Image (cartoon, grey):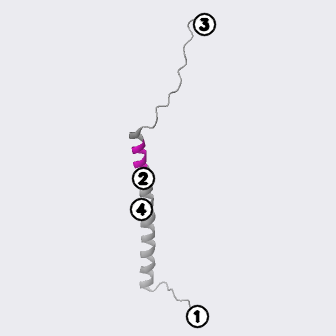
Amino acid sequence: MANVPKIGKAVYKGPSIVKEIIYGIALGLAAGGLWKMHHWNNQRRTREFYDLLEKGEISVVVADE
């Protein structure tokens, strides 16, 4: 047992500040991009609704039968 290699232990060094900042920025940009896409979609749908309303293709008044 003279030449038995030692097995090193995994040493926890703590959080890397630079990595944490980069991860935070990346997640923030991803979430912001998704929010902007959601916002643009809502704007498009609202614009289409008012365009159709102005053209008279749709109405918000219930038709009498």
Relative to residue 41, is residue 18 depicted above or below?
A: above
Measured as percent of width and height from the top left, residue 34 is found at 45, 58
* Element at label 2: helix
Q: Quadrant of the C terminus?
A: bottom right
* Element at label 4: helix
Image quadrant where residue 42 sits: bottom left
- Camera-nearest residue between 52 and 34: 34
Badge 3 or badge 4: first in the primary sequence? 3
Q: Give the label, 1 or 3, closer to the camera.
A: 3
Give the Cα separation between the discs numbered 3 and 2.
54 Å
Q: Give the label, 2 or 4, closer to the camera.
A: 2
Does 22 appear in magenta? yes
- Camera-nearest residue between 39 and 45: 39
Residue for point 42% across, 71% down: 43
Which circle marks residue 36 in the picture? Answer: 4
Badge 2 or badge 4: first in the primary sequence? 2
Q: Give the residue at mark 1.
A: 64
Relative to residue 39, is residue 14 depicted above or below?
A: above
Badge 1 or badge 3: first in the primary sequence? 3
Give the Cα separation between the discs numbered 3 and 4.
64 Å
Give the Cα separation between the discs numbered 1 and 2.
51 Å
Q: Quadrant of the N terminus?
A: top right
Residue for point 45% across, 67% down: 41
Residues shaded magenta:
20-26
Which circle marks residue 1 in the picture? Answer: 3
Give the Cα separation between the discs numbered 2 and 4.
12 Å
**Mark 2 residue type:** Gly
Give the Cα separation between the discs numbered 1 and 4.
40 Å
Does 23 appear in magenta? yes
